[in-house]
Amino acid sequence: MKREDPIALRDITLAYDSLLVLKDVNFQVKRGDIFVIMGGSGSGKSSLMKAMTGLLPPVRGQVFYEGVDFWEAGPATRDAILHKVGVLYQRGALWSSMTLAENIALPLEEFTGLGAEEIRDLVNFKLSLVGLSGFEDAYPAEISGGMIKRAALARAMALDPGILFFDEPSAGLDPVSARLLDELILELKQNLHTTIIVISHDLESIFTIADTAILLDSEERTVIASGKPEDLLRNSEDSRVQKFLTRVQTVFPET
Amino acid sequence: MKAKGYETDGAEPGFVLLDRLGSDRLLARMTGVWKIGVRLPRPENVLKQAEPFPSAGHLSFETSGITSWDTSLVTFLSSFLDRCAMLGIQADTAGLPPGVQRLLQLAGAFRSGHEGEKVHEKVTFLERTGGKALGFFQALFAFLLFVGGAVVALGRLLSFHARFRFSDFMAVLQESGPNALPIIFLISALVGIILAFVGAVQLRMFNAEIYIADVVGISMAREMGPMMTAIVMMGRTGASFAAQLGAMETNEEIDALRTLGIDPMEFLVLPRMIALIIMIPLLTLYSDVIGILSGALTGIGMFGIPASQYYEETKVFLTLNQFGIGLAKSVFFGSIIAASGCFYGMRCGRSASAVGDATTRSVVSGIVFIIVADGTFAVITSVLGI
Ligand SMILES: Nc1ncnc2c1ncn2[C@@H]1O[C@H](COP(=O)(O)OP(=O)(O)O)[C@@H](O)[C@H]1O
Ligand SMILES: [Mg+2]
């Protein structure tokens, strides 16, 4: 683990009460990389993200942000770290009682000293980045699933975070919207140099965007492979890895 | 008996003949139509054909006699194969139609997944009782923690440290105040009329109809006003708090707040609790007035009590004290309603039925708490003699 790594996990073990979800997870993410966490439903991908975004304290192990032990740090440090982190949740998680503009403005209002004018300009700019100009005053219930994901991305980017988390960005989207989102993720990496952590089991997306990937397994409850997806596909002899990377994607809705 | 099928009328229903080939080999010859709506054999009955079972036997299938099938064949086979496995009979599925083999594999794959690990143990009566009791205390403890958290958040608000959205607060104020007036009006007017009628029937026997004024006034101000308002508001606003917060929890909106470092207690719970606690005494007062007026109209209009007498009687007996007790209670009830609605909303799970469950629970326990609190008040006021 290098001190400058934006995020690194050491021996992370996660559980809900007595249900062990993951044990001894280790990895580090390089600055500016797109790091993909792969795994079937229920393998603990979202739980891992919760441990990195302050929602689920690990039973054991450490999460480091640039060498700072996140869960050992005080609340003030934790808040400061999280303000440099943006999260796109699996279901978008836009605040339903607020318009899109208000959703994006909230973090800016709460955590910057910007005036109303500047905030409005920023909000409009972020919305136009994700192709949603003109929807400032729409409520989340009034727009489609793909638009919700994009608006949620605009919100995640509100504070210009150095690290972005995406929980299954393509889940629940039609293939076209899913590919558009992949392109958007690549743009963010190339133009803003954001470090991006993506949870996914959408193969097309994984092979398109990933610099590095890890595969979680729900039987072993830990990481069973890591590397560039193409290399894993070529070199790994583990049948579970091969099975995951070569499976024909079913039409079953996956969560 | 001929079963009703769609395209199967006249065709042979599914049948299995178990043949013994040698001492430890079984052959299942399957024939006919295996479709939903056709009368199909039960796996356990089929196996009876082969009793006594060979120990460690083999079973193969011969299925060329099957004319058509759907998933009822797969369902039958899935359970049949389970039974064979339990009896130590090794089944070879090679003789089954390829489609059936594939579906069986799929079903097996899902079965050996996560669910398979959950062993359904038989729970004894004592364990069940103990579990319920522990669950109750855990929930009570969690509720107390929640109330404690709300008080801490209130402290932060009063010291200007809380993140509190004034616009949200105003919206809740509107929703739980003015918007509730029509239903409170209706309920209170009816309760006033009912009180007057019930009182009149009894009092008439003593020629004492004038005391309707006391019955209506005191019961409305002290008991029925606060109580009916609380119950209506629990079902209306408390339930909607639980549903709103529950939907937000299900939709990960509350996680999104937490990750930003915004305490949902300050941001979501506090505006709701404060708005309701402000509004409920006002609604109670409104309910008192409506109930007393409608009782008066009934007394004067239906039972012929002179209006001036009714007015005098009310003025003498209905002291401000009575209103005070009612309003004090209503503040308590308001806290219970808001806390119960928000508590269950915030604890809502992520499953499809979670929001409905949270709403139901909040209303049921809220109403129970309201009535318990009312009883406690009755005891305290009677001991204090007020
Ligand atoms: N809040 C929770 N309480 C209890 N168990 C949970 C909770 N969230 C997830 N789990 C369990 O943890 C496991 C991993 O879940 P999750 O991290 O959501 O998986 P994934 O995102 O990979 O589908 C699952 O078995 C799930 O049932
Ligand atoms: Mg998930």
Image: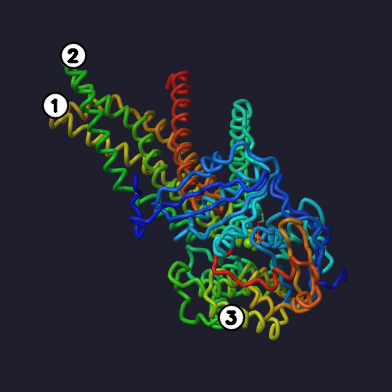
Residue in the image at 49% along x and 66% along y = A98
Q: CA distance from mark 3 to mark 2?
A: 85 Å
* Residue labelled with disc 1: B303
Toward the viewer: B60 or A163? B60
Q: Chain of mark 2?
A: B
Of label 1 and label 2, which has the lower sequence position? 2
Residue B213 locus on image (x, y percent): 24, 26
Q: Identify residue type, mark 2.
A: Phe
Query: Which residue is outermost to the top?
Result: B206
Query: Which residue is outermost to the bottom?
Result: A191
Q: CA distance from mark 3 to mark 1?
A: 78 Å
Q: Identify residue type, mark 1.
A: Phe
Quadrant that contains the N terminus of chain A: bottom right
Q: Are marks 3 and 1 on the same chain?
A: no
Q: Chain of mark 3?
A: A
* Residue labelled with disc 2: B206
Where residue B132 is drawn, which disc sits there? none
Mark 3 or mark 2: which is in front? 3
Q: Is residue A73 visible?
A: yes
Is the residue marked by circle 3 packed among few (<14), some (14-19), or many (20+) residues within 10 Å? some
Residue B197 locus on image (x, y percent): 20, 27
Q: Chain of mark 1?
A: B
Q: Is mark 3 within 8 Å of ligand 2?
A: no
* Residue labelled with disc 3: A179
Q: Identify residue type, mark 3.
A: Arg
Left or right placement of residue A94 versus residue A141 in this view: right
Q: Is mark 1 within 8 Å of ligand 1?
A: no
Q: Are marks 1 and 2 on the same chain?
A: yes
